[in-house]
Amino acid sequence: MSFHVRRKDREITDPNELRQVLKTTKYVTVALCMDNEPYLVALSHGYDETKNCVYFHCAPEGKKLVYLKANNRVWGRLCWISASLTSATTFTPRSTSQAQYI
């Protein structure tokens, strides 16, 4: 199943603009799922522009890691304030990604 962006005039497709969002946003909501049980958590993150990779800090054990080890497909949502906007805007990736515990 494929979904589209309803407001094409609001869609961000430029890779440089997407990287800027990843560099400047402070929090990401990450959605995880295990045994058909969803778990969403808001996290601070770091973005490595060279590797095009998002990092999250967490303890070496806990609920996030249990869910990630059971199912490494994740989805994330960013919320940031743009200089050209007066309110918070959300960015949702077009697909899920695979997480890896380092």
Image (tube, rainbow, N blue to C red):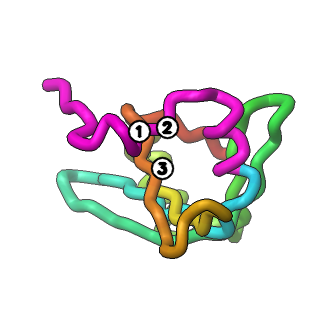
Residue underneath mark 1: 11
The residue closer to the viewer here, 29 or 100, is: 29
The amino acid at mark 1 is Glu
Vertical placement of residue 23 versus 3, above or below: below
Vertical placement of residue 55 versus 9, above or below: below
Q: Earlier in the sequence, mark 1 or mark 3?
A: 1
The residue furthest right is 50
Q: Quadrant of residue 61?
A: bottom right
**Does residue 57 show up magenta in the picture?**
no
- Cα distance between the residues tagged 1 and 2: 4 Å
Is residue 66 found left or right of 57 in the rendered image? left
Badge 3: residue crowd in 10 Å (few <14, some 14–19, many ≥20): some
Q: Residue at x 39, y 57 (%)?
A: 31
Look at discs 1 and 3 and give the one toward the viewer. 1
Q: Residue at x 19, y 32 (%)?
A: 3
Q: Quadrant of the image for the C terminus?
A: top right
The amino acid at mark 3 is Leu
Badge 1: residue crowd in 10 Å (few <14, some 14–19, many ≥20): few
- Cα distance between the residues tagged 3 and 2: 28 Å
Total marks placed: 3
Task: Write the start and end of the magenta stretch as one range.
Answer: 1-22
